[in-house]
Image (spheres, rainbow, N blue to C red):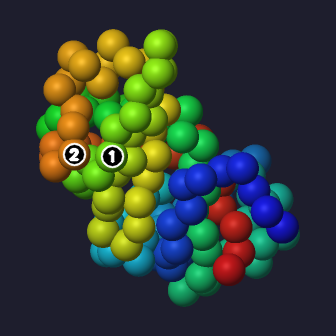
Amino acid sequence: MSLSIRNQIAGTVLSVTAGEAMASVKVRLAGGQDITAAITTDAVKDLGLAEGSAVTALVKSTEVALATRPVEGISIRNQLAGTVTDVSTGGAMGAVNVAVEGGGLTAAITKDAVEELGLASGTAVVALIKSTEISLAAA
């Protein structure tokens, strides 16, 4: 199956905490950083997810926000440190490619944000992703 989702990073399930309808799945990405995905308990069962399962984390580029340093006092659990490798902007929007350990991410953000944050190749950033915006695929 081919997907339009550009952000795909391999990882291994560290833990699954299931509730009635939703589950919290902690994943260690290939580069060593951890993320949390909030998915349905049905999806956990359908994918056969358990500690040690190989997965691919999938995130749409429109769901990746960028900061120039770690953010405190925020409910977003996933903060991946990385370095900007490329920036391309159009009239209103920009695509920012970020290298993170074990893979890469693309963030679709406004041109104004690119300019205000001073994003350019080599800039250290933190990619912010809500756990509800991370999908998992069984590897």
Q: In the picture provided, is 55 more to the left or to the right than 87?
A: right
Q: Secondary structure at mark 1?
A: strand
C-beta proximity under 8 Å, tags 1 and 2: yes
The x, y position of residue 91, in whole percent, is: 47, 13
User: Three-letter amino acid code at disc 1?
Assistant: Asp
The x, y position of residue 94, in whole percent, is: 43, 27
Q: Nearer the viewer, residue 131 or 100?
A: 100
Residue 121's mark? 2
- 95 up-or-down from 47: above or below: above
Q: Nearer the viewer, residue 27 or 3?
A: 3
Quadrant (top left, top right, bottom left, bottom right) of the C terminus? bottom right
Q: In the picture provided, is 47 more to the left or to the right than 97?
A: right
Crowd class of label 2 (few under 14; some 14 to 19; many from 20; radius 10 Å): some
Q: Nearer the viewer, residue 129 or 74?
A: 129
Q: Secondary structure at mark 2?
A: loop
Residue 86's mark? 1
